[in-house]
Amino acid sequence: MQRIKVTLSLLLLLSLTAFSCESKQEQKKDNEQTAGTQTVAVESPFSSENAYEHLQKQVDFGPRVPNTDSHAACLQYLYETLAATELEVQRQPMELTAYDGTVLRATNLIASYKLERTSRVMLFAHWDTRPMADHDSDPALRDKPIDGADDGASGTAVLLELARIIAGADLKNIGVDILLFDAEDYGVPEGVAYNGRTETTWALGTQYWTKQTHVEDYKADFGILLDMVGAKEATFYREYFSVNAASRYVNKIWATARSMGHSKYFINEMGGAITDDHYFVIENLRIPCVNIVNYNPSRTKGFGDYWHTHQDNMDNISKETLQAVGETVWKVLLDYDAEQGK
Ligand SMILES: [Zn+2]
C-alpha cells in the first residue's frame, strides 16, 4: 500500500466532522465506560500462538510474489488451511496486468460462514508480498523481494486463526466472509515514473474482485481490513478513508480495543490516508470499510521503518500485537452479532 498526501487541514476537518456527528454520543459513552485505566482481562478464543505459526509458515515459503513457486506453494497452504474448517471456500483465479505490463497469475481466496445470511461482515487482508524493497536503505538490495512478515503475512495469519474460530462459532444472526486478496503490493515503485493514476496500480486483486464478486450483487454491512498488524511497537491510528466511509465502525473497533486494554496499539487519533484494499471496496461497492494498519503520522514514512525493506522479517513480529488485533476483531464480531439479534 502507499500513503496518499492529503492536506492536514482536510484531515483535521474530517476528524472534527467524524467526532461531531452521530459518533459523538457513542464516543461519550465509550469514554465513560473506559474512564480510568481499569480494564477487565477477557478470555478470548483467539490464539496468537496459532496466528504466529500461520505467519511463520507463510514466511518460510519465501516471498509470495505472483508468478513464483513460493507464491503457488503458499496459496495451496492457505487454501488447505481454510478448507480444513467448516467454511465454504472459493478460489478466484485471475490474470492481472501490473504497472510495468507484467501479467500476474493471481488468486483471491474467499471463505464464507453462513452464505445464506443477508447481514454480513467482510474481513480481509492481502496475502501477496512486495516484489522489491524500494524503501530499503541499501540500494543493492532494493530489487530483491521482501519476506513481508508484517506486510502481507500478519493480516493473513490473523484471519486464518479467526477462520478457525468463526467456523466453530455459533453466531446467530450474521454471516462472515474472509477474503484473502492477491496482488495488493505490486504497485508502482518509489521514484519510477508512471503514466496514469498510481493508486490504481495497487490492490489489483481487490479491484478485480469488486468488479466480479464471488456471489452476484455481494453486499456486506461493513468490512475490516487488516494490514501490517503484527509488528512490535505497532500503532493503529484512525485512517482517513475509513473514518470518511465508516466512522461508526471505526468508533466501535477503537472503543472495543480500549475496553480490552489495547489502547497502546489503537490510538484514538487521526492517522494518514492510505491507498489500500479497503479504498477500492469503498469506492467500487460502497461497503463501509475500516483499515487497521500500522501507521503513525509522526513517523517519517508514516508506516514502520521496516516498511518495504528487508527488515520486514520475523524479528519484527510480536505475538502480543497479533493477540491485541485478533481478539479485538473477534469481540467486534460477537457484539455485532448480538446487536443484529435485537
Ligand atoms: Zn506493502
Image (tube, rainbow, N blue to C red):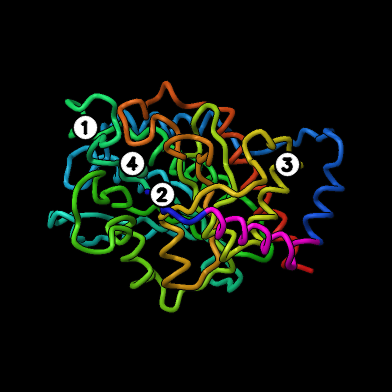
For this orientation, the residue located farthest to the bottom is: 217
**Residue 14 falls within the magenta-colored stretch:** yes
In this rendering, which labeled residue sits more in front, label 2 or label 4? 2
Q: How many angstroms separate mark 4 from mark 3 (CA)?
A: 34 Å
Residue at label 4?
A: 77
Residue 142: numbered disc:
1
- The residue depicted at 59 percent of the width and 45 percent of the height is 237
- Quarter of the figure with residue 34: top right
The kind of secondary structure element at disc 4 is helix
The residue wearing badge 2 is 3
Q: Can residue 113 be seen in this view?
A: no
Residue 267 within the magenta-colored segment of the rendering: no
Is the CB atom of the residue marked by disc 4 within 8 angstroms of ligand 1's nearest atom? no
The spot of residue 341 in percent (x, y) is 75, 67
Taking the image as shown, residue 181 lies to the left or right of residue 40, namely left
Q: Which residues, given as a range, are shown in magenta?
A: 8-24
Q: State how far apart marks 3 and 1 are (Cα).
A: 38 Å
Placement of the C terminus among the 4 image quadrants:
bottom right
Q: Where is residue 11? Give x, y as percent.
A: 56, 56
Marks 1,2: beta carbons within 8 A: no
Q: Which amino acid does label 1 sit on?
A: Arg
Q: Which label was assigned to residue 258?
A: 3
- Whichever of callouts 3 and 1 sits on the residue coming sooner in the sequence is 1
Residue depicted at 33% across the width and 41% down the height:
77
| Of callouts 1 and 2, the N-terminal one | 2
Q: Is mark 2 on a helix, strand or loop?
A: strand
How many residues crowd around disc 2 within 10 Å: few (fewer than 14), some, or many (20 or more)? some
